[in-house]
Every structure is written in C-alpha cells, then in structure tokens.
Amino acid sequence: MFEKKPNIASPDLSKMKEVIIDHRTKIYIAPGADVEEAKTRYRERNNTKRSR
C-alpha cells in the first residue's frame, strides 16, 4: 500500500561551526568554510524568498 520513506539522518551539529546571522538566527557550516561568505549567501537567499 504505502511506501516507507527512508530515514534521513541530520548532520552532527557538534562537528560544525555555528554562525550567528542576527539575534535570533543561527546557521551551521563546515569547520573550514568562510564565515562571511556563509552570511552573505544566507542573506541573499533569504532576500530572494521575501521578494517573491
């Protein structure tokens, strides 16, 4: 009847670097990734969603 959905494992956040965007938004990136680039990409993607 119904197909079982596969379990998708979430990443281990203790192994990732936390980046604070603003007072209520945090994202997690790979330890070697650039913090400023991650902030810029997040803001661009978020602004694109709002303008629709």
Image (spheres, rainbow, N blue to C red):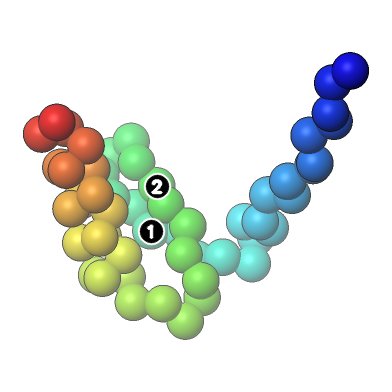
Which residue in the protein does label 1 denote? 19
Q: In the rendering, at what x and y percent does residue 42 appear?
A: 28, 53
| Residue 4 quadrant | top right
Question: Type of residue at label 1?
Answer: Val
Q: Please give left or right for residue 31 compared with residue 45 in the image.
A: right
Disc 1 to disc 2, C-alpha distance: 6 Å
Q: Are marks 1 and 2 in contact (CB under 8 Å)?
A: yes
Identify which residue is drawn at 47% across, 57% down: 28
Relative to 26, say whether 35 is above or below: below
Q: Please give left or right for residue 17 compared with residue 40 in the image.
A: right
Q: In the rendering, at what x and y percent does residue 38 appear?
A: 31, 65
Q: In the rendering, at what x and y percent does residue 51 appear?
A: 10, 34
Which residue in the protein does label 2 denote? 26
Element type where label 2 sits in the image: strand
Relative to 32, say whether 45 is above or below: above
Relative to 48, say whether 41 is above or below: below
Characterize the local packing of mark 2: few (<14), some (14-19) or many (20 or more) Cα atoms within 10 angstroms: few
User: In what quadrant of the picture does the N terminus appear?
Assistant: top right
Q: In the rendering, at what x and y percent does residue 44 appear?
A: 18, 53
What residue occupies the far top of the structure in this picture? 1
Element type where label 1 sits in the image: strand
Question: Type of residue at label 2?
Answer: Lys
User: In what quadrant of the picture does the C terminus appear?
Assistant: top left
